[in-house]
Image: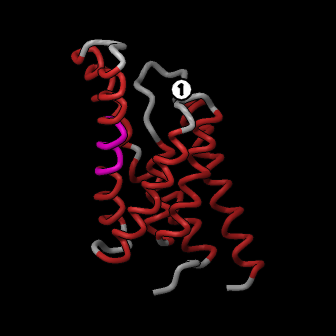
């Protein structure tokens, strides 16, 4: 790929990141539903479709946007970067680079995300376990419901602008 192609691909993925953030925080945020975690799914999609190096960098960008919007601490940058990297490695060596590989990686990432949220709040005695589960389980369900639309958004960028990683 030429430098121009890579620039166009990154711009497309950054526009997808902007669209996912706007949908997640400004359209779905005010609704009376649990806030889904679209940006971790987008980080996984970047890694699944483009490979581990791209997934790590793109996951870091997703984490930076999530942290900047005040959703979580700056640790979300490292967590989403790891999600993108691990999903890229899984798609390269274990799973297929298609929707099924993305679904498996997304389920694992979202389970880790919610488990981390519950355990960290339990450790600081923020709330009892039943209250945390009443928040975490609907958030997990809504996040899983948006797994395919987020994948198709990232796949649009991958298919229309060429794959950076070649096997």
Q: Which quadrant of the figure has residue 88? A: bottom left
Q: In the picture provided, is 122 more to the left or to the right than 14?
A: left
In this image, 144 relative to 152: left or right? Answer: left
Image location of residue 147, percent across then percent down = 39, 49
Q: Is residue 97 magenta?
A: no
State whether residue 9 is above or below residue 69. below
Q: Could you tell me residue 9's position as x and y percent?
A: 66, 69
Q: Residue furthest left?
A: 130
Mark 1 neighbour density, 10 Å: few (under 14) some (14–19) many (20 or more) = some
Residue 151 vertical position relative to residue 109 in the rendered view, above or below: below
Q: Residue at x 45, y 87 (%)?
A: 167
Q: Position of residue 164 (x, y in %)?
A: 58, 78
Magenta region, mostly helix, strand or loop? helix
Q: Is residue 111 magenta?
A: yes
State which region is magenta.
Answer: 108-114
Residue at the spot x=49%, y=22% of the render?
Answer: 31
The N terminus appears in which quarter of the rendering? bottom right
Q: Which residue is under mark 1?
A: 29
**Does any portion of residue 151 appear in the rendered image?**
no
């Amino acid at each position: 790929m030429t430098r121009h192609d890579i620039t166009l691909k990154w711009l497309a993925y950054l526009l997808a990141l902007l669209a996912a953030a706007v949908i997640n925080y400004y359209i779905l945020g005010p609704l009376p539903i649990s806030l889904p975690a679209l940006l971790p799914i987008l980080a996984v999609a970047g890694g699944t479709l483009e490979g581990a190096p791209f997934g790590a960098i793109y996951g870091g960008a997703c984490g930076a946007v999530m942290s900047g919007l005040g959703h979580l601490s700056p640790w979300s940058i490292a967590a989403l970067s790891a999600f993108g990297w691990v999903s890229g490695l899984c798609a390269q060596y274990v799973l297929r680079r298609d929707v099924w590989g993305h679904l498996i990686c997304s389920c694992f990432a979202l389970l880790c995300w919610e488990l981390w949220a519950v355990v960290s709040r339990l450790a600081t005695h923020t709330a009892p376990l039943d209250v945390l589960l009443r928040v975490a389980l609907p958030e997990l369900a809504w996040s899983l419901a948006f797994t395919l639309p987020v994948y198709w958004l990232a796949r649009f960028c991958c298919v229309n602008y060429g794959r950076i990683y070649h096997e």
